[in-house]
Amino acid sequence: MKRLFLLMVLAISVFMFTGCSERKTLDSARSSLNSAFECDMKMNYDNSEFDARLKRIEPGVWETEFTAPDTLAGVKLMFSGNDVTASYKGLSFTVPKKALPVKSILTNFITTVDTLAAAPELQGSEKDGIMTVTGETESGTYTLTMDTKSGLLNSFSMKNIPVQINFENMQVLSTQPAETTPVTMLNEPVQITES
């Protein structure tokens, strides 16, 4: 009987101490993702860093303005529905999203956030105050991390694309949930190339 009791105590202890890897639902993260927000973004790719200000206006409508390096500073990308508009110093052109390179990490990030924001709940694993959500798009496996307490974005990466995006200074602009619209995942991988 004593052994059975010790085994039960040991099993309960192991379960309690491994609780950090259990799946959790985080309403604050889903709420942050389903709002209008803006943040600073640092993209690391092939020993280069790209800085930008990222803004989610509503589902499917995003704006990015690059601030570094100097060769990209001032370039704006507007994602709206099925189109992407690039502008710089008054010049602009629009292309369909499907014409973008298949491994575009930014397009994959936007699609992932819009999809997660529209989901009935957001689940992931939690450790040391960071919630990690992993999933699959048609372009590959992604990892999205958020602060567990605030639900604010921390980072985004994809297994088959050698790019890491880190987020700072995130501000939720509207606490009203944005109207959700159906979002489809990309059928093709997206590629970021250096100029």
Image (spheres, helix red, strand yellow):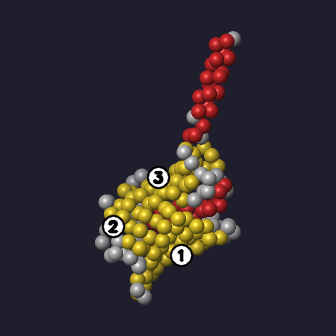
The amino acid type, in three-letter code, at marker 3 is Thr
Q: Which residue is mark 2?
A: 193
Residue that protrudes farthest toward the bottom in the picture: 90
**Which of the two discs, 3 and 2, labels the residue nearer the N terminus?**
3
Identify the secondary structure beneath mark 2.
loop
Above or below — where is 194 with respect to 22?
below
Q: CA distance from mark 1 to mark 2?
A: 22 Å
Marks 3/2: CA–CA distance = 20 Å
Give left or right: position of 20 versus 1. Answer: left
Percent of width and height locating residue 90: 42, 88
Q: In the image, what residue type sits under mark 2?
A: Thr
Mark 3 vs mark 1: which is more N-terminal?
A: 1
Residue corresponding to mark 1: 80
Residue neighbourhood size for the residue with mark 1, other residues' Cα within 10 Å, grouped as few (<14), some (14–19), many (≥20): some
- Which residue is more in the foreground, 79 or 9? 9
Q: Height in image: 20 above or below 104?
A: above
Task: Tell me if label 1 and label 2 are in contact, CB under 8 Å.
Answer: no
Q: Secondary structure at mark 1?
A: strand
Instruction: Name the residue beneath numbered marker 3.
Output: 141
